[in-house]
Amino acid sequence: MVGIALMVVASLAVPLVDGIAKALTASHSPFFIAWLRYAAAALIVVPLTLPWHRDFRSVRGDFASNALRTLLAVAAMTCFFFAIADIAFATAFGGFFLGPVIAAVLAAWLLANGSRRGGWVRPWPA
């Protein structure tokens, strides 16, 4: 039950924070809003993870890929903030729903993943 409650909170928090970001684009740069979002996330996440990861050896072993993933996430969020500054929030937020579709098509094409017997894998039994 706790997992469901956390999913509900997360599902409601993301559009709420993005709506606040849309309102902030009227007076602040999208670069500043992206920086503020990730700085606030760091202030929340770092204290929560310190009790379990005090030595950070696991992070140092894979630092390059973690840094690249973080930079790409920040770049994507900055692009989103630039988008919501110019277009309607619902239109920009709808792009999030296209992301998994694009990822599935690219995975099937680039990785030869997701298809059996010449067709897509059905999520239900035949």
Image (cartoon, rainbow, N blue to C red):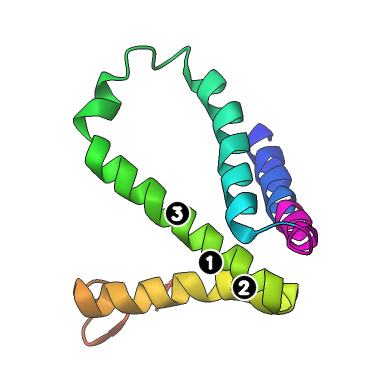
Report the disc number at residue 83.
Answer: 2
- In magenta, the rendered stretch is 15-27
Are there few (<14), some (14-19), or many (20+) residues within 10 Å of tag 1?
some
> Which residue carries the number 1 mark?
79
Are there few (<14), some (14-19), or many (20+) residues within 10 Å of tag 2?
some
Describe residue 80's horizontal placement relative to residue 103 as left or right.
right
Q: Quadrant of residue 126?
A: bottom left
Are there few (<14), some (14-19), or many (20+) residues within 10 Å of tag 3?
few
Magenta segment, principal secondary structure? helix
Report the disc number at residue 60.
Answer: none
Look at the image and say whether residue 44 sits in the magenta stretch.
Answer: no
SS type, badge 1 = helix
Q: Can you say whether 20 is above or below 10 in the image?
A: below
SS type, badge 3 = helix
Disc 1/disc 2 C-alpha distance (Å): 6 Å
Q: Quadrant of residue 119?
A: bottom left
Q: Amino acid at mark 1?
A: Cys
